[in-house]
């Protein structure tokens, strides 16, 4: 004898299968979200590495510019001293004369 469609065992089996299907869908969504999160994390790690390289290059460039600026200031100061001595040769040889 075939079971009746209203048989409580079949109803429980259908309910259990529905729950199993829902659980499988939830798990698939969680795994997809996890995969998306892992991919996003990998992209962020790549961006971080790229930015670290760019920061190192910018800091090195800044250091070099600072050194070049200091060297240029030293040359300008020396040149200004030379010009000052040319413009005022007597004051340079007799500094006390400048204060009189």
Image (cartoon, helix red, strand yellow):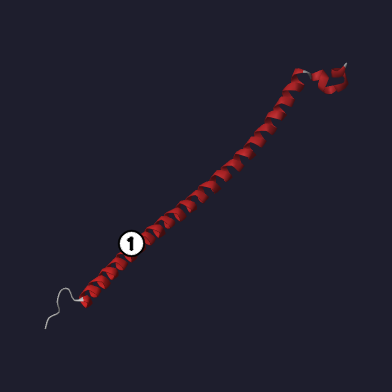
Residue 32: image x %, image y %? 34, 61
Residue 14: image x %, image y %? 23, 72
In the image: residue 5, left or right of residue 47: left
In the image: residue 43, left or right of residue 24: right
Residue 87: image x %, image y %? 75, 18
Indicate the quadrant containing the N terminus: top left, top right, bottom left or bottom right: bottom left
Residue 94 visible in this rendered orientation of the protein: no
Residue for point 46% across, 55% down: 45
Residue for point 24% across, 75% down: 13
Q: How many labels does the image show?
A: 1
Query: Within the image, what quadrant is residue 69 found in?
Result: top right
Residue for point 51% across, 47% down: 54
Query: Within the image, what quadrant is residue 70 found in?
Result: top right
Q: In this view, does 63 lie above or below 90?
A: below
Q: In this orientation, which residue lies closer to the viewer: 86 or 3? A: 3
Circle 1 crowding by C-alpha within 10 Å: few under 14, some 14–19, many from 20: few
Q: In this view, does 71 lie above or below 38?
A: above
Work out which residue is located at the far left of the displayed protein and give it.
1
Q: In this orientation, which residue lies closer to the viewer: 77 or 88? A: 77
Residue 14 visible in this rendered orientation of the protein: yes
As helix, strand or loop, the secondary structure at mark 1 comes to helix
Q: Name the residue under label 1.
A: 29
Indicate the quadrant containing the C terminus: top left, top right, bottom left or bottom right: top right
Residue for point 66% across, 36% down: 71
Query: Within the image, what quadrant is residue 74 found in?
Result: top right
Q: In this orientation, which residue lies closer to the viewer: 31 or 49? A: 31
In the image: residue 16, left or right of residue 47: left
């Amino acid at each position: 004898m075939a079971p009746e469609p209203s048989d409580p065992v079949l109803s429980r089996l259908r309910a259990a299968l529905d729950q199993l299907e829902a659980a499988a869908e939830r798990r698939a969504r969680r795994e997809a979200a996890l995969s998306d999160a892992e991919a996003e994390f990998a992209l962020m790690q790549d961006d971080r590495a790229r930015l670290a390289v760019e920061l190192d290059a910018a800091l090195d460039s800044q250091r070099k510019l600072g050194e070049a600026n200091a060297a240029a200031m030293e040359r300008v100061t020396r040149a200004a001293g030379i010009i000052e001595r040319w413009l005022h040769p007597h004051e340079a040889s007799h500094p006390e004369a400048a204060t009189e």
